[in-house]
Image (cartoon, rainbow, N blue to C red):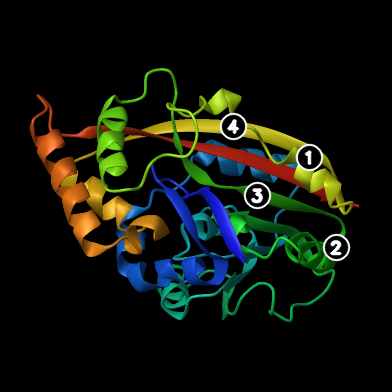
């Protein structure tokens, strides 16, 4: 199966097999932990309220990676079971979350043999798009207790009205190495991005979908920004000559600025839906 979608948090398109791409982050587990941001506290506070989670609730996370979202919910008094495809990522998560009430299982969510109707919340933070669309809603529904909730969100590259012009400039370099942006430039503003309500409802398994949006900003030096790009599947699988040319241009353009950093916005759309 081939998929065509914007790589999460990247300014280039990706065309590849799902199974091949979903394993690429495993090869950069150390870099992922250092470079990927956490999510806003407001997102987790809203999630707890919208999913009506009580202290001691039992949560299932799909694709915990190194545990960035996991920790925020553990600190709010919940117990978690995490299903992570990558063994190295899972080991990072176990170390990062030592002492908390959490289990980390190494498996794909599609193949994992979980306890049916035993969780108050099933959630995926920047991982849902990797799960087989023919399986994910049904499998999540099976794991939830009656009245439980499903929550989905991703940390994406946001383009508000005042986004850094660096990204328009560097897009010309992507074009020159054969990685042309598919679609209009600039991309839609965060408030104009579509959400997944229709898809969630079309599953016939979830309803009462509630949506919240978040935008935040992080400043990066050239080294920090390249370290971030090295955690995205589209850049990991790029031909070495392409990557060298791109990264050289990024370093040169940031170094030429009066202030040698780039301002990147992040955007997340939280979806919380009730099990029917």
Q: Could you tell whether 4 is left or right of 212 in the image? A: left
Q: Earlier in the sequence, mark 4 or mark 3?
A: 3
Q: Look at mark 1 in the image and give the residue it sits on.
A: 198
Q: Nearer the viewer, mark 2 or mark 4?
A: 4
Left or right of residue 190, residue 247 in this image? left
- Measure the C-alpha gap from mark 4 to mark 3: 12 Å
Q: Which class describes the residues within 10 Å of circle 3: few (<14), some (14-19), or many (20+)? A: many
CB under 8 Å between callouts 1 and 3? no
The quadrant holding residue 239 is bottom left
What residue is rendered at 37% in x and 18% in y? 162
| Mark 1 vs 3, N-terminal side | 3
Identify the residue under disc 2: 145
Q: Nearer the viewer, mark 4 or mark 1?
A: 1
Per the model, the C-alpha gap separating discs 2 and 4 is: 27 Å
The percent position of residue 191, horizontal first and vertical second, equals 57, 24
Q: Is residue 269 above or below residue 275?
A: above
Q: Of 259 and 41, which appears nearest the observer?
A: 259
Q: Using the image, determine if residue 6 lies above or below residue 114.
A: above
Q: Which mark is residue 152?
A: 3
Q: Are marks 2 and 3 in contact (CB under 8 Å)?
A: no
Q: Residue at x 62, y 64 (%)?
A: 62
């Amino acid at each position: 199966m081939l998929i065509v979608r914007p790589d999460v948090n990247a300014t280039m398109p990706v065309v590849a097999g799902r199974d091949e791409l979903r394993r690429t982050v495993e090869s950069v587990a150390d870099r992922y932990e250092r470079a990927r941001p956490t999510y806003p506290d407001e997102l987790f506070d809203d999630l707890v309220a919208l999913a009506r989670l009580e202290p001691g609730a039992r949560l299932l996370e799909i694709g915990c990676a190194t545990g960035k979202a996991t920790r925020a919910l553990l600190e709010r008094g919940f117990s978690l079971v995490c299903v992570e495809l990558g063994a190295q990522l899972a080991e990072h998560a176990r170390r990062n979350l030592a002492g908390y009430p959490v289990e980390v299982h190494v498996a794909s969510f599609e193949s994992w043999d979980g306890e049916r109707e035993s969780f108050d919340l099933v959630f995926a933070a920047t991982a849902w798009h990797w799960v087989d669309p023919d399986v994910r809603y049904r499998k999540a529904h099976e794991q939830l207790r009656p009245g439980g909730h499903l929550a989905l969100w991703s940390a994406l590259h946001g383009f508000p009205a005042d986004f850094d012009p660096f990204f328009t400039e560097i897009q010309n370099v992507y074009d020159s190495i054969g990685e042309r942006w598919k679609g209009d430039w600039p991309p839609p503003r965060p408030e104009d991005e579509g959400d997944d309500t229709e898809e969630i409802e079309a599953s016939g398994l979830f309803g009462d979908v509630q949506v919240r949006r978040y935008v935040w900003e992080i400043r990066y030096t050239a080294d920090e920004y390249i370290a971030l790009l090295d955690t995205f599947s589209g850049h990991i699988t790029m031909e070495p000559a392409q990557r060298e040319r791109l990264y050289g241009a990024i370093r040169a353009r940031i170094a030429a600025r009066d202030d040698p950093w780039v301002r990147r916005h992040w955007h997340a759309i939280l979806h919380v839906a009730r099990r029917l």
